[in-house]
Image: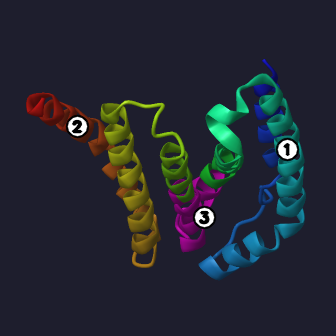
Amino acid sequence: MTDGIYSVAMTLLVLDVRLPDNFHPTNADQLLQALLGMWPKVLPYVLSFIVLGLRWIAGVQLRSKADLLGGAYIRWWLLYLLLITCVPFTTILVGRFGEFAPAIWIYAGNTGLIAIVCWRLMKLTPEIENAHHVMGRQISLLLLLTSAVLCIGFSFISPQHALWALLLNLVAPMMMRRTAATQMAAH
C-alpha cells in the first residue's frame, strides 16, 4: 500500500515538467533551447523525487530483509523509478515534437537508460531468477537498448521516421520462445 502512495506521488511530481501548450518550435534548435530552459522545473522535480525516494527506501529497509536485496539494488531501483516517472514527459515530448531530433534523443535516451538500469538490477539478483527467465530478460533488454540507440542514430537522418526503430522490440517474444525451445531441447 505504501509503495503505491510513493509511486503516485513521485509520478505526479513530473506533471509540471512540460513545455507550454502554445509552444510551437519551427526547428530542432528552438526545441533544444526550450528543453534546456526547463531546468528550473526539472531540478525541483529531481530533488523532490530523491527526497521521496530516500523516504521510500527507509520504509523498504524497515519492512524487508535488506540483506536479501542490499543497498546497491535499492539505489538502482530508485534510479529505475525516476526513469519510469519520466516516461509520460518523454512520450508527450515525442508525441508533440517528434519531427525534431532532440525530442527523439530524450525519449530514446530515457528508454535506453531504463534498459541499462534493468540490466544492472538483474545482475544484482542472479540467485533470485531462473536461468530461462534471465535469458529472456537479457534478450528483451538488449533489443530495447539496441532499438533506442538505432532510434537516436536514425534521428540524425530522419527524425520523423526514427521511432520506427522501436518496432524491433516486437521481435523479443519470438526470440524468447525460440531461446526457451533451444534450451529445453539441450536438456
- Badge 3 crowding class, 10 Å Cα cut-off, few under 14, some 14 to 19, many 20 or more, is many
Q: Nearer the viewer, residue 167 or 57?
A: 57
| Sooner in the amino-acid sequence: mark 2 or mark 1 | 1
Residue 104 point in image, percent of width and height: 54, 65
Disc number placed over residue 54 in the picture, else none: 1
> Residue 162 is drawn in which quadrant?
bottom left
> Residue 170 is drawn in which quadrant?
top left
Q: Is residue 39 left or right of residue 107?
A: right
Q: Nearer the viewer, residue 17 or 20?
A: 17
Describe the colour scheme in one phrase. Answer: rainbow
Q: Quadrant of the C terminus?
A: top left
Element assignment for label 2: helix
Residue 134 point in image, percent of width and height: 37, 38
Residue type of the residue flagged with mark 1: Leu
- Residue 43, above or below 27: above
Measure how far apart labels 2 and 1 are at the Cα level: 39 Å
- The residue that label 2 is drawn on is 174
Of circles 3 and 1, the one toward us is 1
| Sooner in the amino-acid sequence: mark 3 or mark 2 | 3
Residue type of the residue flagged with mark 3: Ile
- The residue that label 3 is drawn on is 106
- Residue 111 magenta-highlighted: yes
Q: Magenta stretch?
A: 92-112
- Residue 169 magenta-highlighted: no
